[in-house]
Amino acid sequence: MTLTLKHIVPVLNAQWKGEFGDIEIDHISIDSRSLQNGPGTLFFALSGPNNDAHNYIGELLDSGVFNFVVTHIPDEVKGQANFIIVPDVLLALQQFAAWYRDKFHFPVIGITGSNGKTIIKEWLNFLLGPDYNIIRSPKSYNSQVGVPLSVIGINEMHNLGIFEAGISTVAEMERLEPIIRPTIGILTNIGTAHDEGFANIADKIKEKLRLFKRSEVLIYQKNKTIEAFIQSGTKRFSWSFKEEEAEVLLARRTEGEQTIITIKKGAPEFEITIPFRDEASIENAAHCLMVLLFFEYDPNEIKGRMSLLYPVEMRLVVKNGINNSTLIDDSYSSDFQSLKIALDFLENQKQHKKKTLILSDIFQSGLGNEELYSRVSQLVVSNKINRVIGIGPIISAFKNKFVNCSTYETTSEFLAAFPALHFRDETILIKGARQFRFEKIVALLEEKTHETVLEINLNAVSHNLNFFKSKLRPETKMMVMVKAFGYGNGGLEIARLLEHHKVDYLGVAFADEGISLKASGISLPIMVMNPESTSFPSIIQYGLEPEIYSLKGLEAFLKVVSAEKKSAYRIHIKFDTGMHRLGFEEKQLDELIAILRNNPLVTVQSVLSHMATSDDLNHHAFALQQIALFEKMVTLFCTELGIDPILHMLNTSGISNYPEAQFDMVRLGIGLYGISNDASEQKYLENVSTLKSIISQLRTIPAGDSVGYGRRFMAQHDTKIATIPIGYADGISRHWGNGVGYITINGKRAPITGSICMDMLMADVSGISCKEGDPVVIFGLDPTVNEMSKSLKTIPYEILTSISQRVKRVFYRE
Ligand SMILES: *Cc1c(COP(=O)(O)O)cnc(C)c1O
């Protein structure tokens, strides 16, 4: 559909300012960093508590974008573009999407509920894919912003939509309903997620059901509480394993790793087999089954397709590849929308200059192949991909649309050619439809390590950053501490993400940490808290900024600056206001001021101090005394020198407990990694790090037998024991063994039996359904690092930073 500004402006009830004429819009964007922005882009300048895209209009003009939806025109860009002025940009995006949605008349399945939305969406796409051209939400794009962006992907060739909607508080569904306008509704279930956003369960149910107010039919698991709120005009199509009144009554039994579901009532009686046995998968499959029954599929067809359901990987995973390459593994889906998202992620995470795309045939784009591969080629060019490897008969036929492209008809052909392809020092995006089995490619390219990994959720890092930003005044700057490998989570990857989020400063403990970040291309300014004088020359060479805390250190640094023939070099002055660790004391101020007065060699970029008790309100008075002393010292120092440096004092718990002492900047640390020492605040943070391993071996021992060194566990009865390949050399304290701690397997807690060994530990898994190779969680959601640290009488910082560097870090994004 051709859309021009002339169409769009009246829809938004907006005012158009700018003389650049009407223009055809072929791309809607909200991300100023996307390389996909160009002349046909209409950019919606969203603003939140933490970030205002109006600030990036200048940059976007430079990259050729000149159509903007804004609330106001910033002074510096007046007269330079087409501006569509609206009172609320998010609302405008939603209105636009709703208007766009109205142009299409085909069945749309809308999914909401607390769990399973994305899996059901992906499974339905797989089950219905052979018969429809489906448009669906990419990944889990189900938010106030994600839903409009998903719907805007519809085109004339689509004839079925599947969209998910996620809400966290009241009044949100009202805005999503007109955008999705589902004709068929699925309510997955009502769990406890986002409970804080609703007064009670009834409010939550009512809000979710608003999505279906114009739907013909609602599919749900039979439930009286829910039914009390369903509108009378909506046809109910419920299922149940026990409620006889459900429209479709099901029965089930487990056979090995499979579940057999029988349809007992409401449709012809028949059986299907699904390759899962866990509760969540069975529920998700039941919802999908109901859709197929509603569409009146033939039982044999249903049976065949449902037996092929597969685990859905919902994340984009970053992995270490062979020969110093980096992999972005998206080897389970291939559609045009998700390709765009994956390419943005590639740009954001690229670790090397060279970017490679391995791409299979793309299905269900709703476009003809000629047009589709032209568009893919444009994406490849705008994203500056250095080489493309196409796999599949269709993409092979369009090879001439790409530069530096090699193609293979099948994955096996590619695998045969692999030894001669020499992947090295590059970031490789692997994106393929499921039937191409690209996991075989990932297996070849992935660096082999043992099974224990620390998984780091980059979305959660972003969430936590935004949470703390929202507690600050808008003008307060943010330094983020990435010392000790980003608190054990991987310094470089975290730093990259922070650069993407445009934080103001990074802080590290030692020069070599800063050097390695700079050498890897991080351009944010970096403060080094504990620079040794031997490292001063390399600090200057890499443009790092030292914290200066003593007269001796200052004199030594000035000598090096002078020898290196630098001037006005940025330094940070640390005051000791009571922590008594590092810093100038009040009585040294005169001498410090005398040295710095009119000194051309250095510039005082910031002045800081550190609180000893920001986390403990029992020491409230002491904290206030530190703050007061800082103010006093700073006033004298700055007045005497006539300077106005950045002032900062607060760490994570300081941000929460002493917001009045934000000064000009704060130094966020542990909070970024999802940990707070305040239980009410902890609720709002997302878990970042999950330490995982697998079961190496299972055995059952009889009563009276023992486990491990020193026979410190004695079985009282027959006991099933699992051995896990992680031990104290990986950073798990021995105090966590001998029944004190536990691990989680398939959602169940298994106490650690006997002493933790250097590289292994054993756990009692009696009564837990599990097998060798099953994943286990050492910490993450259960147990949490907080919980472990309490039991071990230490602090979360120590647990996180103790995880040995031999444990592989895996970064992912949902
Ligand atoms: C580590 C550190 C921080 C961050 O502390 P958190 O408690 O992790 O937020 C801030 N400032 C200084 C000087 C630090 O050493």
Image (cartoon, rainbow, N blue to C red):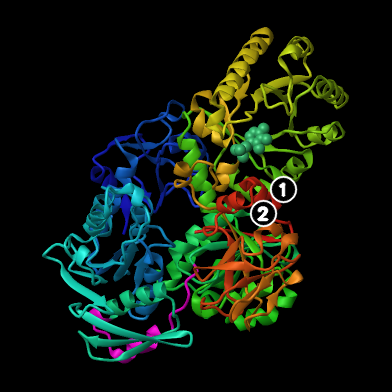
**Which structural element holds mark 2?**
loop
Residue 396's place in the image compared with 571, above or below, is: below
Residue 521 occupies which quadrant of the picture?
top right
Answer whether residue 524 is visible to the viewer in this image.
no
Q: Residue at x 66, y 64 (%)?
A: 738
Tell me how many marks there are: 2
Residue carrying label 1: 520
Which class describes the residues within 10 Å of circle 1: few (<14), some (14-19), or many (20+)?
few
Instruction: Tell me where residue 474 appears, x and y as whole percent.
Output: 46, 30
Quadrant that contains the N terminus:
bottom left
Instruction: Tell me where residue 399 appears, x and y as whole percent.
Output: 56, 72
Mark 2: amino acid: Gln
**First-in-chain label (2 vs 1):** 2
Q: Is residue 157 magenta?
A: no
Q: Nearer the viewer, residue 345 or 193?
A: 193
Is there a contact, CB below 8 Å, between mark 2 and mark 1? yes
Q: Residue at x 23, y 43 (%)?
A: 10
Mark 1: amino acid: Ser
C-alpha span from label 2 to label 1: 8 Å
Q: Nearer the viewer, residue 207 or 182?
A: 207
Residue carrying label 2: 351
